[in-house]
Image (cartoon, rainbow, N blue to C red):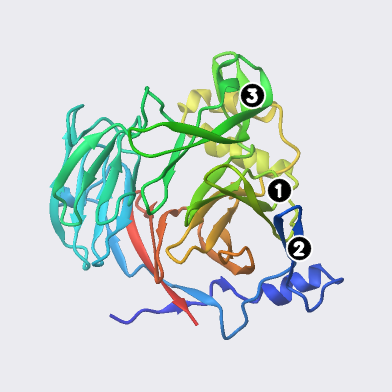
Amino acid sequence: MTIRYAAVAIALVAAGCAAENPGHPAQTHTIADSGGVTIVTNFSGTWTENTRWEISADPVLEIGAVDGDEAYLFKRIGGAHRLPGGGVVAAGETDVRLYDEEGGHVRTEGRKGEGPGEFEYIRAIMACEPGHFNVYDLDWRQSTYTPDGDFVETRRIFPNGVRPYTLRCTASGTFLGLLWAPQALEGHIGLYETETSMIVGHAETTVDTIVTVSGGQRLGQEFGSRPHPFGTVTSFAAVGDSIAISTGEAYEYRVFDLQGELLRIVRMPERNRRIQTEDIDAQARQDAQRFPPELFDRYFEEYRNIEMTERYPAYSQLLVDSDRNVWLRHHVRPLDTVQRWDITDEAGVFLGSIEFDAGVEIEQIGRDFVIGDRKTDEDVPQVAVWGVLKL
């Protein structure tokens, strides 16, 4: 197979951002120590024309079809993960499907239910145990499989009914969870801030609270609350045996050890985040599509009158690839056709930026691939793999 690589990597950020930082025309970053905490301040990326990364112009593998074999039909993608041998495991709502490296269906496991190897609503696939992959149900109940798809066991990963809002893990099997923000249930009206805790634990053992972080901005209404459409979101991932956390409040992320000690603050170049009227209108139209046509105008007007934030979040997602590089996704505005990711190395030095189609939800990043899910032009859910070329 011939793989074409598009020049979508914004590799010359080094030149572009240097112009935005005239005080540092040649210096890409500084590293300082403040009371034992490393401060990395980035002015521009370090990639050059000869060292940038590029993404394949088209997926090298696509799984998902309009009709035909049920093994390729998805109502919804519950998660996707590339296996060490090149095969792919993808989840529907209640089943787990394995495909070979060419996209051929190998087997399907799981079904709807509450027993071992059964699911109510799959929400993620991750590799949290060496030599296995793990599938997570709605309440983060974990089902473990071998790379060949053989079922091993189902278990609760936290004791005493602890069920985090978001879950990640280290390669050594330590679980990282962000708890539900208690303020989400307190009946606030309008825009409000929340605060929550990051927890760390091993399966079925003691859970430790290690750090308090923002739980994001929410919108309270008479019938309940939800994440604010323009509000900040906290995202995190393991970097080896430490945790990288972005709250979206600024162009930065922070790295903590598993005891909650702050190790590093990584600051990225600032960009304009002010919300425009056309952004609000576009988001209102997008969200109103969920309602019957006769309610569209009413919802649209109500939406335009809700209490707004002054600025977009800086970042809305943080992922870590297999080489421990940190990927930070800029908030995707409703009129955006692409999503932009800033990438740093493990030490926090800004490498450069890469763009994807705005509709792609990235699930996993390997040394030479990115796997994610999207909807095609025919509105068909699909898992896709792109190649990553590192020059």
Where 304 falls versus 18 (above or below)? above
Badge 3 amino acid: Glu
Q: Earlier in the sequence, mark 2 or mark 3?
A: 2
Q: Residue at x 60, y 65 (%)?
A: 347
Q: Disc 2 versus disc 3: distance between alpha carbons? A: 48 Å
Residue 54 percent coordinates (x, y)? 49, 75
Task: Using a 10 Å C-alpha cutoff, classify the residue at mark 2 as few (fewer than 14 neighbours), some (14 to 19) or many (20 or more).
Answer: few
Residue 94 percent coordinates (x, y)? 23, 37
Tag 2 residue: 32
Residue 12 percent coordinates (x, y)? 65, 76
Residue 344 percent coordinates (x, y)? 59, 65
Badge 2 amino acid: Ala
Badge 1 amino acid: Ala
Mark 3 and mark 1 in contact? Answer it, CB < 8 Å: no
Task: Using a 10 Å C-alpha cutoff, classify the residue at mark 3 as few (fewer than 14 neighbours), some (14 to 19) or many (20 or more).
Answer: few
Tag 3 residue: 302
Q: Disc 1 versus disc 2: distance between alpha carbons? A: 19 Å
Where 360 falls versus 311 (above or below)? below
Q: Residue at x 58, y 41 (%)?
A: 234
Tag 1 residue: 250
Looking at the picture, tell me which residue is in the foreground, 138 or 40: 40
Looking at the picture, tell me which residue is in the foreground, 279 or 132: 132
Q: Disc 3 versus disc 1: distance between alpha carbons? A: 29 Å
Mark 2 and mark 3 in contact? Answer it, CB < 8 Å: no
**Residue 273 makes an appearance in the image:** yes
Task: Using a 10 Å C-alpha cutoff, classify the residue at mark 1 as few (fewer than 14 neighbours), some (14 to 19) or many (20 or more).
Answer: some
